[in-house]
Amino acid sequence: MAGKPSIVFAHGLWADGSCFNKLIPTLQAEGHEVFASQHGLDSLESDVACVNFTLNHVPGPIVLVGHSYGGTLITKAGTHDRVGALVYIAALAPDEDETSQEQLDKYPRTPIFEHVDVTDGRVWLKPSGVPHFCGDLPEAEQKLVLATGAVPVADLFNQQVPGTAWRTKPSWFIVANNDRTVPPDLERSAAERMGAHIRPVDSSHVPMLSHPDFVLDVIREAAKSLNA
């Protein structure tokens, strides 16, 4: 068991660290130290800082895994010297001169953004939007996703901090072919741009919940590359 890479997860919008709960027990049982960053979606800077202090807490080498907006976070925080590999799950991955919103704006708007409500300066996902987010989950799980989601500040995707880890770190990219939140074409293009190992799956935006075994295999592949 000794010497296995650590795994750190970074969640996206309308989620928290519990969105990885179908992955974490298995990875722990296989001997990995695992942590999920619990960031508040208050600002890009504070979210990256939260991922960084989580990285400081676990031994290297680390496989850093980001879902959705978490891909922006691992792109920034992944320059940390303990990070050996990056895994993107249906994620954003902006370049140094690009915000999350600018990356999204290059593609047609996905259906989910017709089902949001901005209140108290935060972007809330309406119940009507949940099928566009995680429609391949059972109804009870969809309700749990809605209930446990962290809610972002309205301008989060327009914020910028330095760092483009995928330029220097090996990366894997799970493309969700049926995504109605982040455009699959964006995911494929981002994966090709970074020279990632591309792993497509017929999934909604949340393959870690709807196809956990598939996602586990990709994380294992990244971890094995660090042991090799």
Image (tube, grey):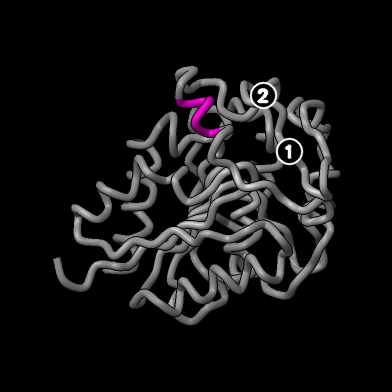
Q: Which mark is residue 6?
A: none
Q: Secondary structure at mark 1?
A: strand
Residue placed most toward the observer, 185 or 141: 141
Q: Is residue 95 left or right of residue 33?
A: right
**Magenta span of residues:** 141-145
Q: Which mark is residue 127?
A: 2
| Disc 1 residue type (three-letter) | Trp
Question: Residue 134 at x, y = what percent?
Answer: 56, 27
Q: Secondary structure at mark 2?
A: helix
Q: Which mark is residue 124?
A: 1
Residue placed most toward the observer, 5 or 26: 26
Q: How many marks?
A: 2
Neighbourhood count class around disc 2 (C-alpha, 10 Å): few under 14, some 14–19, many 20 upward: few
| 3D distance between C-alphas at marks 2 and 1 | 9 Å
Work out whether residue 179 can be spotted: yes
Q: Is residue 122 left or right of residue 184?
A: right
Residue placed most toward the observer, 206 or 120: 120
| Disc 2 residue type (three-letter) | Pro
Question: Residue 213 at x, y = what percent?
Answer: 33, 36
Residue found 60% across the figure and 49% down from its top: 12
Residue extending furthest toward the left: 1
Residue placed most toward the observer, 163 or 226: 163
Q: Is residue 13 magenta?
A: no
Work out whether residue 228 can be spotted: no
* Quarter assignment of residue 209: top left
Residue extending furthest toward the top: 139
